Image: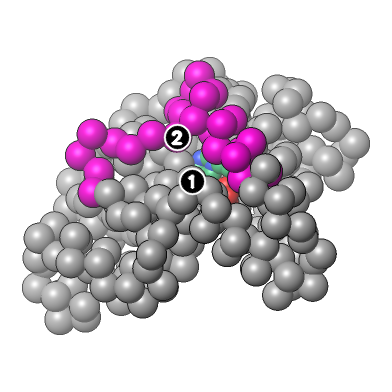
Amino acid sequence: MIAPEVGHRGVPAASATRGRIIIAVDGPAAAGKGTLARRLATTLALPYLDTGLLYRAVGRRVLDAGGDPRDVPAALAAAAALQVSDFARADLRDPVADMAATAVAAIADLRAALLGFQRSFGGAQGAVLDGRDIGTVVFPDARAKLFVTASAEERARRRQAELVARGVAADYAQVLSEIRDRDAQDENRPVSPLRPAADAMLLDTTALDADGAFARAMQLLAPHIVDEALLRKA
Ligand code: DC
């Protein structure tokens, strides 16, 4: 069980980030956050957490139990039962999991239940985390915040290519419509909506490949990660 706060109402107190190197990478679906955040973590020798997997694993558990991902008790029960093995499932990134994750992510109590795990991730060292609300809610005092975007059309193109590479048939128009739908749900939900933190650095990857996005991110982060050890590794 990885979510000890399930069932408790309200949001846990803000995390203590003093001395920890927390890099927040937020943005909409398929903007290139995951690839970028993973590479930043490797380069900076920090642990990496894809927080979307938490919502995906909860959504999948709800579906497995025959429940509705919008149902609050079902989502909280699924979170309470999460095991490490849930994150290794092969079906966390298909379109059904996309929609289930987006639905459970709109539940305030579920988000509160998952906060403690995210805030303690990486321990005293810190971590790179990607998601939608890392810089606004999970770590408002993160060392550095990136908000990674790309046009909806480019994100749909990337998502379609990723699905096809995995052998999943995917129609571009449908992928684009699903991306727009998920954007709208993530941006308009009342709890922790997707939006850049006031102090986030914007990184538009529409015209950048993975190497270009990484190089630009390192430029943006450099003034914030002046720790000697990090500079040696970067
Ligand atoms: O990043 P992703 O596509 O794997 O995220 C899946 C869903 O979870 C998506 O609808 C956004 C939501 N999510 C969220 O609300 N907060 C996060 N920190 C991470 C993901």
Which mark, residue 28? 1
Q: Residue at x 26, y 73 (%)?
A: 215
The 10 Å Cα crowd at callout 2, few under 14, some 14 to 19, many 20 or more, is many
The residue that disc 2 covers is 194
- Label 2 lies in ligand 1 vicinity (Cβ under 8 Å): yes
The CA distance from mark 2 to mark 1 is 7 Å
Residue 86 picture location, percent across and down: 71, 56
Image quadrant assignment for residue 46? bottom left
Q: Secondary structure at mark 2?
A: loop
Q: Is residue 36 visible?
A: yes
In this view, 164 is above or below 128? below
Residue 228 picture location, percent across and down: 9, 73
Q: Is residue 82 visible?
A: no
| Range drawn in magenta | 178-201
N-term mark: 2 or 1:
1
- Ligand 1 is in which quadrant of the figure? top right
Along the line of sight, the residue nearer the viewer: 3 or 68 = 68
**Quadrant into which the C terminus falls:** bottom left
Q: Residue at x 34, y 55 (%)?
A: 204
Q: Is residue 48 left or right of residue 125?
A: right
Q: Residue at x 73, y 26 (%)?
A: 70
Amino acid marked by disc 1: Pro
